[in-house]
Image (cartoon, rainbow, N blue to C red):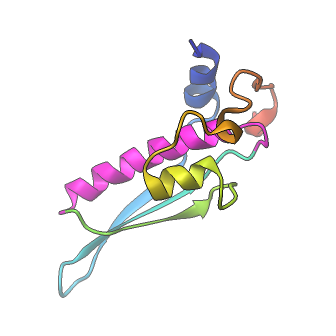
Amino acid sequence: KHDHLKHVLFNKLGHVMQTVVLTQRHSQEKVVIGNTHLFYHPMASHIRCLKMLMASRQLEIEHKENQHCPIIFCGDLNSHPNSGVMKLMLNRYLDSNNGKTWKHLCKYEWEEGAGGE
């Protein structure tokens, strides 16, 4: 249904998130740290949410692979506190009726030269 969106997400933007697992020498306690920079375009809140979902899933994998250790997630989310990205992060859920997030889903078009291309 949204082949253009899939193409933008996976072929144009890629996904940038650095993760590291740190281990305290003496106690052997671990922590997963993730850092990302989400896409900036003002009409692309839906893309930021989908990228956040991808980042969250990767952090969940690392969390499980490392004895369910704590996660620290940081970066430039290009999102305000009431945005869909923040709702997704804090609630682990985003309603499909969240109008501001999906407002430009069918209108936003990738333009050559956008996102560093």
Type of secondary structure dominating the magenta stretch: helix
Question: From which residue to which does the magenta span run?
Answer: 41-67
Q: Is residue 79 left or right of residue 21?
A: right
**Nearest to the observer: residue 106 or residue 4:** 106
In the image, farthest residue toward the top: 1
Residue pictured at 48% horizontal, 59% vertical? 90
Image label count: 0
Specify whether 87 is left or right of 42: left
Query: Can I make out residue 15 in this image?
Result: no
Q: In the image as oriented, which residue stretches furthest toward the bottom?
A: 26
Quadrant in which residue 103 is drawn: top right
Residue 98 in the image: x percent, y percent?
A: 62, 39
Q: Is residue 19 visible?
A: yes
Name the spot of residue 100 as percent of width and height, x first: 71, 40
The x, y position of residue 70, in whole percent, is: 31, 69
81 vs 87: above or below: below
- Name the residue rendered at 64%, 17% in the picture: 4
Residue closer to the observer: 55 or 98: 98
Q: Horizontal placement of 76 versus 91: left or right?
A: right
Q: Tell me where residue 24 appears, x and y as whole percent.
A: 26, 81
The residue located at (53%, 65%) in the rendering is 74
Q: Quadrant of the C terminus?
A: top right
Q: Please check the rendered image and state whether residue 13 is part of the magenta-colored stretch, yes or no.
A: no
Most foreground residue, 107 or 14 = 107
Give the answer, above or below, for where 5 lies relative to 58: above
Residue drawn where x is 32% and y is 51% of the image: 60
- Quadrant holding the N terminus: top right
In front: 79, or 33? Answer: 79
Instruction: Examine the structure image and report whether residue 49 is included in the region drawn in magenta.
Output: yes
Question: Within the image, what quadrant is residue 48 found in?
Answer: top right
